[in-house]
C-alpha cells in the first residue's frame, strides 16, 4: 500500500508541469527504482498510468507519455517479455502521429529500439512500422531543436540497428531523409545528419538502388555545408568543435561513389577560395574521396587534381625558417603550412591509386622539366634566386613523394630523372668499375651542381625510406626494383666520392649539409637492398671520422658529421646488420674511445667527449664499450693524479667524470637494467683509493673531488639495493682502515664514546688529502643510498660525520641529512640501517656531548659540563663564540639535518627551526625566546658575529630549496607531499610578529632574510591565501634587501613572489589595500644597479598593477611615469622594451598628455 502511494505521488509530481525539474527528476528516479527492484512491473506501471496516457488533456497526456518513455530509457538493460516490448513499441509508434505528445513518443521509441538482444529487442516488423510512421507523420524541420535531435537519433538507430527492416522502404526512406535533413543548422543535429547520410550510403550501395537516383538531390543538400564555418558556438554546443563537424561532413562526402560527379568539381572549385581553412578542407576531402570513389571514377579528374596540387603547394609555401644546421630540415627548409602538407598527402594518395597516370603527368610536366633545364645555370645554392629555390624545393618534394609511394613508382621516377641528374653532376653514365673497387683517395675536384645534388639526394632518401620502411617490401624489391637497385649499384662508388668531394671543395653550408646527408643515406640502406659493398661502407665511416678528428674547427661540418655517424650507428643497430655493426665498432667506436685515451691535445677535449657520448648513445652495445673506455681513461687519470700529481690530469679527469655523470650514466639507466655496469665504477674507484695508500698530491683539487663525488652519487643512485650494499661494504672497509676512524676502541654512547670523540676531533684537524677523499666519497655513497640499503656501524658513522661537518665538510652534513631522512623509525624496519633506529640517531645527534670552544677558537671536547648545564648540538652552535667559522659550519650541518627531517615530516624539525630563530634573535635580548632553559645562559654574553646570524637566516634557504646533490627523488629521499606548504603555514605565524615588533636593525634584517627564503621557495597557492597578511612584510623585506649587493639573488626571488601575487586575481585584491607602498617600492627598484632581472621584474610588476581598479592607481600615475622615464635610457635593451610597455600601460589611464 505504501509503495502504491509512493508511485502515485511520483507520477503526479512528474506529470505536474508546475513542479521543479529537481522534483521531476526525483520522481523519475523513484519510479525507475521500483521497476528495477521488481516491486513494480512495466505492465503494472502502464496500468497505473492508463489515465495519464489516454486523457484528452494534451498537457497531461504529453507528460504521461514522456514519463513512460523516460522510465523505459532507464531500463534499457532490464529484460522484458517480447509481448510487452511489442505492445509498448506499438503504442509509441501510434503516438508519433500525436504531435502534441511527440517528444514522449520519440523518447519511448528510442528507448525500446536501443535495447540489446539479451534484454529483448524490437522485432523487424515493429521497426519497419516505426520507420513508416516516422516518414508519414513527422515534419522534422518544423520541430524544435531538441525534438529534431531526437528524430535524427531515431533515424540513425533505425539505419544502424535495423537495416534489413528499413531497406525495403527504398525511395520513400531516402526521400524522407532528404526532407528531414534539408536546411538543418544546429551543430548537434548536423553531426547526426552527416552520420545518417554516411550510414544510408552503406545501406544502398547498388548502382540501381534508391540512393543512386537521389544522389544529386542529397548532395545538393549536403554540399551547401562545405566548407564548415563554425566560429560562434552557443553554450549547449561547447562540446562540438569545427573539426568534429568537418570530419563528419568529410565522411558523408566520401560515403558513396555516387557523389563523385558532384563532390569532386565542388572541391576543386573551393581550392580557389581565399579562406585557408577552405583550401585545407578541400584537400583533405579530396584525399578521402579519392580512396573511397576508386581509381576508375577518379580517372577523368587526374589532370585537374594534379594542377590543383601544384598550385596549392606553390602558393602556400613560405620563406625558409630553418637553417642547414637543423635536424628537422625538410627539403630546402621552406615552411610547409597545412595547405602544402595536405596537398602532398593528396599527391601520395593519388599516385598510390593510379601510379602510371600521375607519374606520366609528373614526368611530362612542363614546369618540372623547365626547372631541371635551368638548374644547370646555377652551380651553387647562393647563385639561385629566391623564387628559383622555391621551385627547386617543390620539385624535390614532388619527386620525393612520388618515389616513396611504391616500388613501381620509385622505379619510374628513377628511370625518368636519375640518369639526367647524374649527367648534370658530371658523373659518367655508367660506372665502368663494375667490381666496386675501393674509393680512390683523389676526390672529384669539380664543384657539383647544387640543384642536381639536392634532387639526387631527395631520390636516394626516398628509395632508402621506402625499402627501410617495410622488410617485406624490401625483401621482394631486388627483383622488382631492378631500375633503382641497378642504378644505385652502378653509381654508388662515384656518388660516395662525389659527396666526399663536396665536403672538401665547397665552403657553403648547403653543400656541406647535403654532402654529409648523402653519405649518411648511402650508409643506411638496409643490407638486403644496399647497393654498397662493406668496404665502401667502411670508407664512408672513415671519411666522417676523419672529419671528427681533423676538421673540428669547421663547426657545421663537424656537427653534421657527428649526427650522421650517430644516425648510421642507430640504423644498423636497429636493423641488426652484424657485419656493418662490426665495422662501425672498429672504425667509429674504437676510434672515439682512443680520442680520450691519447695524450694528443690538438682536438679540444670537450669535443672529444661530445663525440664519444653521442656515438655511444646510438646503440646499447656501442655505449657499453664506450663506458669501458671512459672508465679506463678515468681510472688512468685518477691514478696519475694520486701517484704523480699530474697537473694536466685533474682538468681532463673532471671533464671525463662530468661526461660520465651527465650523459653516460643517465642513458644506461634509461635504456635498461645493467646493474653490473653501474656497480663497476664505484667499486673500482674505491679499489684505486685503497691501492694508493700515500697520495703524493700536495694541493687539494676540490673541483676534481666534486666531480668524483658527483659521479659516485649518480652511479650509486642507479644501482639496486644489492649492488649498493656491495659498494657500501667496500667503502666502509676502506674507511674503517683509516687512522682517523676509531671503530675498535669506542663503540657506545657512554663516556668512552665521548672520549673517542675527543680523539677523533684531534685527528680530524690533521686529515690527509687521502682521508678527505675517503670521507667525502663515503658521504656521497650514503647520500645516494636507497632507504632499504643498510649502513654498518651507523652510530660511529654519525659521530664521524658530526665531527667532520664542524670542520666545514658539507658532504658530511648532507649525508647526515640523508640518514635522518631515510632511516627507519623501528629497528625491525627494512630501512637504511639494522643497528640504529631514527630515534637513536636523533638522540646521538642532538644529545651527545661533542664540541666546545677554547679561548683561541680551536674545537676541543668538554668534560661534560658547561657552567653546570648539559651541552647539546644546539649548545655547540651557540657556544662557540670566539670562532665564527665552527658556528657557521655547525649551523650548515644542522640545516641539512633539518632538511632531511622536513622532507619526511618529522616533528623534530620544530626544535631545529627554533635553534635557528635563537640565532636570529641572539643579539636582541628583549625578543629572544630560548628554546632550552640554559641555552643562552650557558653561552657567552657577547653578541654573535653578523656572519653567524646570516648563516642562520640562510639555513632556511637550505631547508626550503630543491637540492640537486642530495635529498631529492633521484637519490631516493623520503619526501612527504606538500611539505613546503606545511612548513610555510607553520613558520609564518611565528615570523610575522617577530619581524613587525623587532627593533634591532640587524635582527630585523636577518628575520626578513629568513622570511624571504621561506616564501621564495613556497608554491604560490598557499601564499595567495595569506596574501593580505604577507604583502606588508614582503614590502618591508624588499626595502631592507635592496641595499646590499650580496642580497640581489634573494631580492629577485622575493620580487618574483610579488609578481605572482600581482598577476593573480585573488592576489590583486590583497594588493589594492597597499597600492601606495607597493608602487613606492617598485619605483625604487627600477634603478636597482646590481641586477638587470630585478629592474625588469619591477617594471613588469608595475605593468601588472596598471590593471588594478582605476580609482586606486590613478593618483600614482605621475610617480610611476616619472620613474619609468629613467628606465627608457637603461643600457639593457630588455629593460627599455619593458619600460616602453609600462609607459604605454600607465599613460593610457592618464586623462591628458604628460611631458617630462
Image: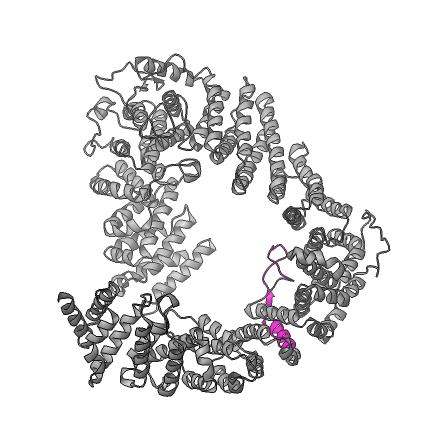
- Asked if residue 449 shows in the view, the reply is no
Q: Residue 20: percent from the left, percent from the top?
A: 19, 72
Q: Position of residue 62 (x, y in %)?
A: 24, 81
**Residue drawn at the location 40% of the way across and 70% of the way down:** 240
User: Does 171 appear above or below 511?
Assistant: below
Residue 147 in which image quadrant: bottom left
Q: Nearer the viewer, residue 211 or 549?
A: 211
Q: Is residue 759 magenta?
A: no
Which range is magenta? 304-332
Number of marks in the rendered image? 0
Viewer-closest of 520 and 720: 720
Give the camera-side residue of 376 and 489.
489
Say how the picture is coloured: one colour
> Does the stretch in magenta take in 315?
yes
Q: Nearer the viewer, residue 652 or 952?
A: 652
Q: Is residue 170 above or below residue 649?
A: below
Left/right placement of residue 737 relative to residue 916 reads right
The C terminus: image quadrant: bottom left
- The quadrant holding residue 25 is bottom left
Q: Quadrant of residue 137?
A: bottom left
Q: Position of residue 857 (x, y in %)?
A: 35, 20
Q: Position of residue 365 (x, y in %)?
A: 72, 75
Q: Is residue 80 above or below residue 272?
A: above
Amino acid at each position: 500500500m505504501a509503495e502504491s502511494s509512493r508511485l502515485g505521488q511520483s507520477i503526479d509530481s512528474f506529470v505536474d508541469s508546475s513542479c521543479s525539474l529537481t522534483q521531476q527528476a526525483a520522481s523519475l528516479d523513484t519510479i525507475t527504482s521500483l521497476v528495477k527492484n521488481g516491486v513494480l512491473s512495466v505492465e503494472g506501471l502502464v496500468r497505473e498510468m492508463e489515465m495519464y496516457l489516454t486523457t484528452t488533456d494534451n498537457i497531461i497526456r504529453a507528460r504521461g507519455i514522456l514519463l513512460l518513455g523516460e522510465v523505459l530509457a532507464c531500463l534499457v538493460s532490464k529484460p522484458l517479455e517480447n509481448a510487452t516490448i511489442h505492445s509498448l513499441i506499438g503504442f509509441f509508434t501510434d503516438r508519433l502521429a500525436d504531435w502534441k505528445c511527440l517528444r514522449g513518443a520519440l523518447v519511448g521509441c528510442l528507448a525500446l529500439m536501443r535495447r540489446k538482444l539479451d534484454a529483448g529487442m524490437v522485432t523487424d516488423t515493429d521497426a519497419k512500422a516505426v520507420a513508416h510512421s516516422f516518414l508519414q507523420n513527422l515534419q522534422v524541420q518544423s520541430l524544435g531543436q531538441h525534438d529534431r535531435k531526437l528524430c535524427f537519433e531515431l533515424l540513425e538507430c533505425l539505419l544502424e540497428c535495423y537495416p534489413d527492416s528499413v531497406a525495403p522502404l527504398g525511395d520513400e526512406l531516402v526521400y524522407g531523409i532528404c526532407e528531414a535533413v534539408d536546411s538543418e543548422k544546429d551543430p548537434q543535429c548536423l553531426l547526426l545528419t552527416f552520420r545518417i547520410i554516411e550510414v544510408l550510403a552503406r545501406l544502398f550501395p547498388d548502382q540501381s538502388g534508391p540512393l543512386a537516383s537521389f544522389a544529386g538531390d542529397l548532395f545538393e543538400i549536403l554540399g551547401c555545408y562545405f566548407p564548415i564555418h563554425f566560429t560562434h558556438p552557443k553554450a549547449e554546443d561547447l562540446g562540438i568543435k569545427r573539426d568534429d563537424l568537418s570530419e563528419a561532413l568529410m565522411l558523408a562526402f566520401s560515403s558513396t561513389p555516387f557523389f563523385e560527379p558532384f563532390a569532386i568539381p565542388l572541391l576543386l572549385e573551393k581550392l580557389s577560395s581565399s579562406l585557408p581553412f577552405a583550401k585545407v578542407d578541400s584537400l583533405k576531402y579530396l584525399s578521402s574521396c579519392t580512396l573511397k570513389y576508386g581509381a576508375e571514377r577518379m580517372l577523368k579528374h587526374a589532370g585537374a587534381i594534379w594542377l590543383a596540387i601544384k598550385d596549392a603547394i606553390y602558393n602556400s609555401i613560405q620563406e625558409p625558417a630553418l637553417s642547414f644546421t637543423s635536424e628537422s630540415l625538410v627539403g630546402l627548409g621552406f615552411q610547409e603550412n597545412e595547405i602544402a602538407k595536405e596537398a602532398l598527402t593528396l599527391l601520395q594518395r593519388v599516385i598510390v591509386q593510379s601510379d602510371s597516370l600521375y607519374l606520366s603527368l609528373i614526368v611530362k610536366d612542363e614546369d618540372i622539366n623547365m626547372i631541371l633545364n635551368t638548374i644547370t645555370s646555377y652551380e651553387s645554392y647562393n647563385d639561385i634566386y629566391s623564387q628559383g629555390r622555391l621551385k627547386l624545393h617543390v620539385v624535390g618534394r614532388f619527386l620525393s613523394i612520388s618515389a616513396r609511394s611504391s616500388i613501381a613508382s620509385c622505379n619510374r621516377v628513377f628511370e625518368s630523372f636519375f640518369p639526367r641528374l647524374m649527367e648534370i653532376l658530371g658523373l659518367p653514365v655508367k660506372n665502368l668499375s663494375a667490381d666496386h673497387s675501393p674509393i680512390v683517395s683523389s676526390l672529384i675536384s669539380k664543384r657539383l651542381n647544387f640543384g642536381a645534388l639536392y634532387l639526387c639526394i631527395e631520390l636516394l632518401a626516398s628509395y632508402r625510406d621506402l625499402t627501410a620502411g617495410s622488410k617485406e617490401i624490401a625483401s621482394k624489391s631486388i627483383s622488382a626494383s631492378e631500375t633503382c637497385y641497378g642504378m644505385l649499384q652502378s653509381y654508388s662508388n662515384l656518388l660516395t666520392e662525389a659527396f666526399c668531394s663536396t665536403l672538401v671543395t665547397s665552403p657553403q653550408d648547403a653543400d656541406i649539409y647535403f654532402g654529409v646527408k648523402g653519405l649518411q643515406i648511402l650508409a643506411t640502406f638496409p643490407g638486403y637492398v644496399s647497393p654498397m659493398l662493406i668496404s665502401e661502407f667502411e670508407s664512408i665511416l672513415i671519411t666522417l671520422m676523419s672529419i671528427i678528428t681533423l676538421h673540428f674547427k669547421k663547426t657545421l661540418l663537424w656537427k653534421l658529421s657527428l649526427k650522421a655517424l650517430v644516425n648510421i650507428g642507430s640504423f644498423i643497430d636497429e636493423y641488426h646488420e652484424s657485419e656493418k655493426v662490426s665495422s662501425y665498432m672498429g672504425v667509429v667506436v674504437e676510434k672515439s674511445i682512443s680520442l680520450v685515451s691519447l695524450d694528443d691535445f690538438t682536438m679540444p677535449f670537450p669535443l672529444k667527449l661530445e663525440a664519444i657520448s653521442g656515438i655511444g648513445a646510438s646503440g646499447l652495445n656501442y655505449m657499453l664499450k664506450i663506458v669501458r673506455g671512459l672508465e679506463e681513461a678515468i681510472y688512468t687519470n685518477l691514478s696519475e693524479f694520486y701517484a704523480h700529481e699530474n697537473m694536466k690530469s685533474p682538468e681532463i679527469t673532471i671533464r671525463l667524470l662530468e661526461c660520465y655523470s651527465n650523459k653516460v650514466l643517465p642513458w644506461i639507466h634509461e635504456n635498461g637494467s645493467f646493474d653490473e655496469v653501474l656497480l663497476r665504477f664505484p667499486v673500482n674507484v674505491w679499489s684505486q683509493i685503497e691501492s694508493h695508500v700515500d697520495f703524493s698530491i700536495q694541493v687539494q683539487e676540490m673541483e676534481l673531488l666534486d666531480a668524483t663525488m658527483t659521479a659516485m652519487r649518480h652511479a650509486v643512485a642507479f644501482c639496486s639495493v644489492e649492488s649498493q650494499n656491495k659498494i657500501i661494504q667496500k667503502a666502509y672497509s676502506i674507511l674503517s682502515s683509516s687512522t682517523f676512524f676509531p671503530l675498535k676502541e669506542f663503540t657506545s654512547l657512554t663516556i668512552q664514546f665521548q672520549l673517542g670523540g675527543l680523539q677523533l676531533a684531534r685527528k680530524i684537524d690533521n686529515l690527509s688529502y687521502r682521508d678527505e677523499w675517503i670521507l667525502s666519497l663515503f658521504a656521497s655513497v650514503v647520500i645516494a643510498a636507497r632507504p632499504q640499503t643498510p649502513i654498518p656501524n651507523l652510530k660511529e658513522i654519525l659521530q664521524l660525520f658530526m665531527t667532520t661537518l664542524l670542520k666545514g665538510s658539507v658532504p658530511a652534513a648532507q649525508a647526515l641529512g640523508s640518514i635522518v631522512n631515510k632511516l627507519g623509525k623501528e629497528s625491525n624496519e627494512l630501512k637504511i640501517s639494522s643497528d640504529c633506529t631514527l630515534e637513536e640517531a636523533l638522540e646521538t645527534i642532538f644529545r651527545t656531548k661533542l664540541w666546545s670552544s677554547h679561548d683561541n677558537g680551536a674545537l676541543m671536547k668538554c668534560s661534560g659540563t658547561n657552567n653546570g648545564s648539559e651541552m647539546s648540538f644546539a649548545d655547540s652552535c651557540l657556544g662557540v663564540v670566539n670562532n665564527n667559522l665552527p658556528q657557521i659550519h655547525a649551523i650548515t650541518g644542522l640545516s641539512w639535518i633539518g632538511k632531511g627531517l622536513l622532507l619526511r615530516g618529522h616533528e623534530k624539525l620544530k626544535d631545529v627551526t627554533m635553534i635557528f630563530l635563537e640565532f636570529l634573535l641572539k643579539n636582541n635580548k628583549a625578543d629572544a625566546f630560548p628554546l632550552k632553559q640554559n641555552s643562552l645562559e650557558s653561552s657567552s654574553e657577547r653578541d654573535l658575529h653578523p656572519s653567524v646570524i646570516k648563516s642562520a637566516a640562510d639555513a632556511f634557504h637550505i631547508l626550503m630549496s630543491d637540492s640537486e646533490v642530495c635529498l631529492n627523488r633521484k637519490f631516493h629521499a623520503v619526501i612527504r607531499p606538500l611539505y613546503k606548504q606545511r612548513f610555510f603555514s607553520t613558520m609564518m605565524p611565528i615570523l610575522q610578529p617577530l619581524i613587525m615588533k623587532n627593533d634591532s636593525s640587524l635582527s630585523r634584517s636577518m628575520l626578513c632574510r629568513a622570511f624571504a627564503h621561506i616564501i621564495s621557495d613556497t608554491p604560490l597557492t598557499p601564499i595567495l591565501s595569506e596574501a593580505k597578511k604577507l604583502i606588508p612584510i614582503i614590502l618591508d623585506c624588499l626595502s631592507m634587501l635592496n641595499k646590499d649587493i650580496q642580497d640581489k639573488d634573494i631580492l629577485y626571488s622575493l620580487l618574483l613572489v610579488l609578481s605572482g601575487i600581482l598577476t593573480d586575481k585573488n592576489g590583486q585584491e590583497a594588493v589594492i589595500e597597499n597600492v601606495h607602498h607597493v608602487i613606492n617600492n617598485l619605483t625604487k627598484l627600477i634603478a636597482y644597479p646590481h641586477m638587470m632581472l630585478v629592474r625588469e621584474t619591477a617594471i613588469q610588476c608595475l605593468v601588472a598593477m596598471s590593471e588594478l581598479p582605476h580609482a586606486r592607481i590613478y593618483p600614482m600615475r605621475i610617480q610611476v611615469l616619472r620613474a619609468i622615464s629613467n628606465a627608457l635610457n637603461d643600457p639593457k635593451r630588455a629593460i627599455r622594451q619593458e619600460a616602453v610597455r609600462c609607459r604605454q600601460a600607465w599613460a593610457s589611464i592618464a586623462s591628458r598628455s604628460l611631458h617630462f
